[in-house]
Amino acid sequence: MQQLTSVVGILCLATLLTACQDESAQKVQTSAAPASPQNVKAVPLAAPQTTDIYHAEVEAPTLPPLNTSPDYISFITPLSGEFTASPPQTRQTRLSDEYWLNVSGAELSGGIDLPISQASSVIRIAPRGDTSSGGLIKADAIAPETISLSLASANTGKHEARSWVKSMADAQALASAGLSDDSSALTLRADAKPGKYRLRVNQPLAAQARYLVNVKEKHSPYQLKLGAPMSIEAEAGRIGLDISLSQGQQGLAPRARLIQAGGESLELAVQQQGEAWQVVLTEPLPAAKNNADLSEIQVDIQTEVDGRPLLRSVKTAFKAYVNSAKLLPQADSRWQGELPTGVDFGLELVTEGRFGLSAVLTGTNSQGKSVAILRSQAAAWVTPDAPRLRLELDPALIAASGLRAPFELRELTLTDQGQMARLSYQDHGLILE
């Protein structure tokens, strides 16, 4: 799971970073354009559409910003061709053929039930740390030869003595394969039958020691699918989830947990609305410890398929953020003759921070179609005393395109570079004419 979080984190942050580092940019400025005689026109922003990203309320971030550069930077990249908007990806989907159980040493010693639907499944047991006493106490690793696995008879319910284990691996073997958490593992035989297995550890274990049991049912037809947001605003009251099982949808009754980067866990209330599910938040999401951290939502289901018990768990990482600023409904456009040179945007914000803007400028051709001219990106340190951020345009590129008004700013995006978070997105930003 650490690998998943790392990969998603890289993708998420790469998506949310303003691209003010594009090596193909033709024009770079490190300070706002000097004042020159220009015509200034007030222009309203378009009303947000249902597919846009927009928040009405502005809050103050609680964590130190990741980017504190005070410099103004502007990039302009030439574009061409008929423009088609590319809305940002806001949701992600995960599939799972496995489940996780958190158990104690006492439970492992007494035996735990594991529903398994697929032959050749892999069972891994990893010791976990416990900080409830104030210090870190880590459970002992389990020797695989002390693990027994039996299958309950479909007729009597009693567990057969026959072994269904094909192979075992100890902590040293798994460490050489890249799993350095002192875990042990076993693989079921290819002729293992579906059913309820009993796993028991026959070595002395501390009763309160904690262990994570992971059952991976590779190639199982029963896959749990979870669709969830890639980023979640801290004040969001609800989180929409898409939850489905590839074979049967009855009696899913999902349970959800929020897992922070540090391992802290919080149970979440889940409600069904039609065919969709929602996590209901009665209070703001717990704050992460660092703006670079990602959190996770884990969904667990316990159901029956064809009369057999089935467990599934699925996790997805997301970025929690505070809506720290929003664009004011009116901006000032600057012109040299009939060509726009830039747009000054006003921001509503509570505390200072580094913010970025980006947009695509389009013009109108002789057939009345919108054609891309350039992409403009800018970032600066913005304060409540001077809440303005200029998005530069290039009149020379506009003139060379041969396009005419009305010009339009498309894909208008505001980001908080201190949180590495996208705050708003408007497909149609504003019209310049």
Image (cartoon, rainbow, N blue to C red):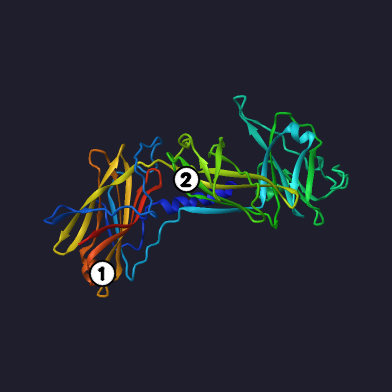
Can the viewer see residue 250?
Answer: yes
Q: Amino acid at mark 1?
A: Thr
**Mark 1 or mark 2: which is in front?**
1
Q: Measure how far apart labels 1 and 2 are at the Cα level.
A: 38 Å
Residue farthest left in this picture: 37
Residue farthest top in this picture: 133
Provide residue 182's location: percent of width, then percent of height.
69, 41
Q: Is residue 232 left or right of residue 122?
A: left
Provide residue 214's location: percent of width, then percent of height.
69, 45
Query: Quarter of the image holding residue 322?
Result: top left
Q: Amino acid at mark 2?
A: Lys
What residue is at 29 percent from the left and 71 percent from the top?
A: 369
What residue is at 16 percent from the left and 59 percent from the top?
A: 335
Q: Is residue 71 left or right of residue 9?
A: left
What residue is at 23 percent from the left and 62 percent from the top?
A: 394
**231, above or below 112, in the image:** below
Q: Secondary structure at mark 1?
A: strand
Provide residue 225's location: percent of width, then percent of height.
60, 53
Residue 364 got which mark? 1
Residue 319 got which mark? 2
Quadrant in which the C terminus appears: bottom left
Q: How many numbered marks have been drawn onto this rendered protein structure?
A: 2
Mark with earlier residue (1, 2) = 2
Circle 1 residues within 10 Å: few <14, some 14–19, many ≥20: some
Q: Secondary structure at mark 2?
A: strand
